[in-house]
Amino acid sequence: MDRRRLTRESFLSSIDYYVRGNGERVHKGITINCSEEGLCLYVFSPVKKGDSLEILKGDLSLPCRELEVRWVKPLGKEIFKVGLLCMKA
């Protein structure tokens, strides 16, 4: 049973992002799906719940570019599936 309020649409795209408060190093990610309030993606550098990510580049039509990590699922040594929620301004 899916408990999401909003429907997620499959969306595969490469993005560039950085983690606020962790330097300005740019990381790469791949989106899996998105909704009006957030997205799910694969990242190749560790992040943790509560981190703030800023999307720098990508074909996303989200109402925000800054998102909060809500959950992280390690899939291997250097790949993580991450759930993100838009941070309201």
Image (cartoon, helix red, strand yellow):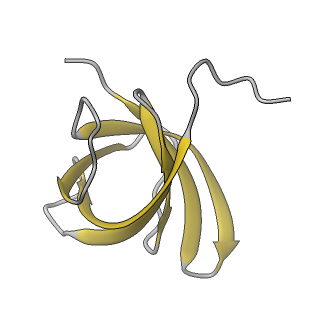
Q: Position of residue 44 (x, y in %)?
A: 45, 75
Q: Could you tell whether 27 is left or right of 37 in the image? A: left
Tell me the quarter of the image containing the N terminus.
top right
Which residue, as the protein is rendered here, is positioned at the far right?
A: 1
Q: Could you tell whether 35 is left or right of 19 in the image? A: right
Q: Nearer the viewer, residue 24 or 89?
A: 89
Residue 83 lies in what quarter of the image? top right
Q: How many marks?
A: 0
Q: Could you tell whether 87 is left or right of 84 in the image? A: left
Q: Position of residue 9 (x, y in %)?
A: 53, 43
Q: Nearer the viewer, residue 51 or 40?
A: 40
Q: Is residue 10 above or below residue 50?
A: below
Tell me the quarter of the image containing the C terminus.
top left
Q: Position of residue 41 (x, y in %)?
A: 49, 57
Q: Could you tell whether 8 is left or right of 76 in the image? A: left
Residue occupying image coordinates x 37% and y 66%:
13
Residue occupying image coordinates x 65% and y 24%:
4
Q: Position of residue 20 (x, y in %)?
A: 22, 47
Q: Is residue 19 above or below residue 4?
A: below
Residue occupying image coordinates x 33% and y 37%:
67
